[in-house]
Image (spheres, rainbow, N blue to C red):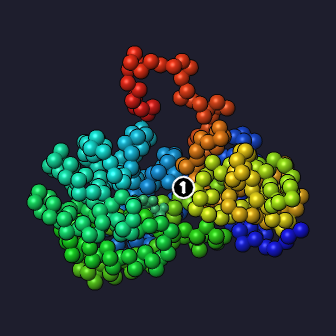
Amino acid sequence: MDTTPSPYAVNGGHLAHSWLGRLDLRLIADRVGTPVFVYSEEQGVKNIGRIKSAAAAAGIEKRVELYIPFFPNSNPHILGPLRKFDSGLLLQLPSEYKILRRFGFDKFIVSPGHVSDADIGFWAQTGYPIFLSSLDEISHLIRIDPRASINVRLDSLSSGKPGIKYSQLHDLKELLAINKRPLNCFELYCGSGNSVDEMISILEQVFMIFLTYFPEANAINFAGGYGFAYDEWNEPNKHFDWHRYFQNLRDIADRYRVPAHVKFLFEPARDVLADVGALLLSVKRSVISNGGANQVLTDGSRTLMPSAQYKQRHHHVIFLDAAMAEMNSNGMRAALRGRGILRHDYVLPGEYAVPEGIGPQNYLVILDVGAYCATQHMEFLSIPPAAEVLIDTEGSIHLISSHGGELDKWRHLLAQKKDLKAARAETVSAVE
Ligand SMILES: Cc1ncc(COP(=O)(O)O)c(C=O)c1O
């Protein structure tokens, strides 16, 4: 038996330090079944509060505005607490806007990547700022809405990522001057998962762009990219050091003499959302040892959160006994198998140390899956999506997405073929 400790699963005591330790997981497993994503409203409140108090400590709370991207989680129920903090949401698609309006959200910015003229028209009539990524798109907005505020997205990485490149800044400035349009705000996307030092070093670039090209701008959007340490157990160590970041930001802004009315916008996703969610799975067999790697069969699938595999993200895992008490992971190392047929259907990358005697009476909970996980689940291999449950700040447990029926994957399959010449246009969205 291989008893080498896994860097990703340490023995015991972790559940108690998490909001999961205060939860009736048994109730959730019995009432909803597994797989189920479980979210904590309280943790979301804590994460936004941490950023807000760091801004206050740096004396910039009146200048800081948070817009949490919707797409990394995309369940409106989970984003409810944002409103308590006067935080907004970052959108990219008209359908996101439509569904969020139904849930009562009304504070948005839009940063969509490249968009069609029709989408520019859609956003222009909402009046929300849209961060456009090419000179052509900006020209179109100016043509259709001479009074629209002009907001642009720059790509600091010079990558394939949507965004005006540094080499085009001069042309952008000219385009705005010819049309007598001031820039309201520019957004600089700098990649994801950056350390505090990396994010601080980018600040110099941001303020240099402000000073050189757009000193008239009313706001600077620092976008996302704030790292979250998935390999840490300790909550403060997982999170981005907003305190140090904001202190540096204030000092650098002062050094560049950025006027006090200029607002600072931020779009953090994983730092706010990752540890808000966990995925509860059931174990379905005792360890399978077919000569190769040992495998623990679960009722999960890589399709429930594909980015864990393709980003090689080793989420922490806590194994639970039948009474949902945490078990010591001191047995063999095994891969966590999903229920699909494909060779690669492992819920997480690599191997984990699993408890001795693990079997169908056990559960496991995968931590820090609140961002870029449930939202990505694919309907591949006919595996239906997982349900979602939210624990509110009073501790009450609510179902917020159901598992759906066994045939859910085929929900839009038409019983009869429809002759397109005879049918009306099938463009009406489900949320309209
Ligand atoms: C424009 C934009 N803003 C914010 C984010 C969120 O980034 P993070 O999760 O690293 O905070 C992303 C992620 O892709 C993004 O593209």
* Residue for point 23% across, 80% down: 257
Q: x, y percentage for residue 291? A: 86, 59
- Helix, strand, or loop for circle 1? loop
Q: x, y percentage for residue 344? A: 69, 53
According to the picture, the residue beneath numbered tag 1 turns out to be 372
Q: Image height check: is 343 above or below 191?
A: above
Front-lying residue, 208 or 378: 378
Q: Image height check: is 404 above or below 316?
A: above
Quadrant of the picture in which ligand 1 is shown: bottom left
Q: As drawn, is 372 to the left or to the right of 289? A: left
Within 10 Å of disc 1 (Cα), the crowding (few <14, some 14-19, many 20+) is many
* Residue for point 30% across, 57% down: 133
Q: Image height check: is 117 above or below 393?
A: above
* Residue for point 40% across, 53% down: 89
Front-lying residue, 398 or 148: 148
Front-lying residue, 278 or 288: 288
Q: x, y percentage for residue 249? A: 36, 77
Judge: label 1 CB < 8 Å from ligand 1.
yes
